[in-house]
Image (cartoon, grey):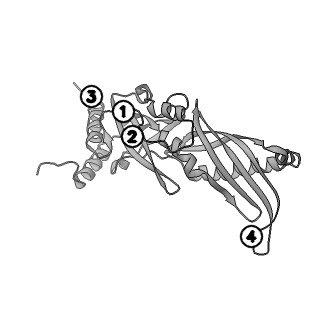
């Protein structure tokens, strides 16, 4: 006798399999898309060829959803691998792994540019490489900062100091409000040349670090990674309880999420009715 919860897991596996953008077979074949980041060619090749370990999304039923998230004005592909199994009378346990390799490779080109352009300071970022490291993300690049006095029109006036510093930032993600929110843990700055030495001497380096932490933190808080559900599946009321950044293989970035979804009778009726309206399912008259 197949339990009700096991039957529901099978039903969900079937529904994900027939929906556009979803796959019933969650086995990863590696990322074959072209790299847009400015990372080392060998590293990029290894990142693209990596396979997501099925143990990271284990469940009686395993499904895959290909989708995209916005980053500034660019759509970035992501893949979500999910395992479903019984968790209670009205909920299925969800273990998901989010493949963030395209985000990792595309973000350097997308995010390189102005971080702040106010009348008294202008800060520009050049992101060279993003790599996963355990449950953290390491970002290498450079920061160019200019400090100026504001004129009467609140525009940059006389510039009194400028410096370029090499930068290494370490961050991580945590699950909050059904999304993966990234935050910076630390920023290490290495000023260049004689001007860099003066920046250290007069405390400018610390001002640059504080500005990067502030502005980058604001950007990250406003741009979480929210794994999408297929259209009509929001009625499942997913509850993401824990997770964070994870390595697919050394250097390759992913994210883990653990939670559950609602499979009560009322929810299932609402879900099936919505799928019928969209023409995904057809019931007998």
Q: Nearer the viewer, mark 3 or mark 1?
A: 1
Which is nearer the eye, 200 or 36? 36
Q: Secondary structure at mark 2?
A: strand
Label 4 and label 1: CA atoms lie apart by 55 Å
Label 3 and label 1: CA atoms lie apart by 14 Å
Q: Secondary structure at mark 3?
A: loop
Badge 2 crowding class, 10 Å Cα cut-off, few under 14, some 14 to 19, many 20 or more, is many
Label 4 and label 2: CA atoms lie apart by 51 Å
Label 2 and label 1: CA atoms lie apart by 9 Å
Badge 3 crowding class, 10 Å Cα cut-off, few under 14, some 14 to 19, many 20 or more, is few
Q: Which residue is mark 3?
A: 3
Left or right of 204, for residue 53:
left
Q: Are marks 3 and 1 in contact (CB under 8 Å)?
A: no
Q: Nearer the viewer, mark 4 or mark 3?
A: 4
Q: Which residue is mark 1?
A: 84
Q: Residue, x 54% and y 28% (percent of image)? A: 250
Mark 4 or 3, nearer chain start: 3
Q: Which residue is mark 4?
A: 155
Mark 3 or 1, nearer chain start: 3
Mark 4 or 2, nearer chain start: 4
**Spot occupied by residue 58 in the image (x, y as percentages of width and height):** 40, 27
Q: Is residue 151 above or below residue 187?
A: below
Q: Can you say which quadrant of the picture contains the N terminus?
A: top left
Q: Nearer the viewer, mark 2 or mark 1?
A: 1
């Amino acid at each position: 006798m197949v339990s009700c919860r096991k039957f529901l897991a099978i039903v969900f596996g079937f529904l994900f399999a027939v929906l556009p953008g979803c796959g019933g077979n969650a086995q990863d074949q590696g990322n074959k898309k072209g790299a847009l980041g400015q990372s080392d060619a060998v590293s990029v090749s290894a990142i693209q060829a990596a396979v997501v370990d099925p143990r990271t999304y284990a469940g009686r039923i395993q499904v895959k959803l290909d989708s995209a998230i916005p980053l500034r004005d660019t759509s970035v592909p992501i893949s979500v691998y999910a395992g479903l199994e019984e968790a209670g009378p009205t909920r299925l346990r969800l273990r998901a792994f989010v493949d963030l390799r395209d985000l990792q490779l595309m973000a350097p080109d997308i995010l390189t540019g102005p971080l702040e352009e106010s009348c008294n300071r202008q800060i520009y970022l050049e992101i060279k490489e993003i790599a996963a490291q355990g449950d953290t993300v390491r970002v290498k690049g450079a920061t160019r900062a200019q400090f100026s006095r504001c004129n009467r029109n609140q525009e940059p006036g006389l510039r009194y100091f400028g410096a370029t510093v090499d930068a290494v930032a370490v961050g991580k993600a945590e699950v909050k409000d059904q999304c993966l929110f990234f935050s910076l843990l630390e920023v290490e700055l290495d000023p260049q040349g004689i001007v860099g030495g003066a920046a250290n001497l007069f405390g400018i380096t610390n001002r640059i670090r504080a500005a990067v932490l502030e502005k980058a933190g604001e950007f990250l808080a406003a741009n979480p990674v929210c794994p999408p559900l297929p259209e009509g599946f929001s009625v499942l009321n997913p509850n993401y309880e824990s997770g964070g950044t994870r390595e697919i293989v050394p250097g390759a970035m992913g994210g883990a999420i653990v939670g559950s979804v609602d499979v009560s009778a009322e929810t299932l009726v609402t879900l099936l009715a919505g799928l019928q309206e969209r023409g995904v399912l057809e019931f007998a008259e």
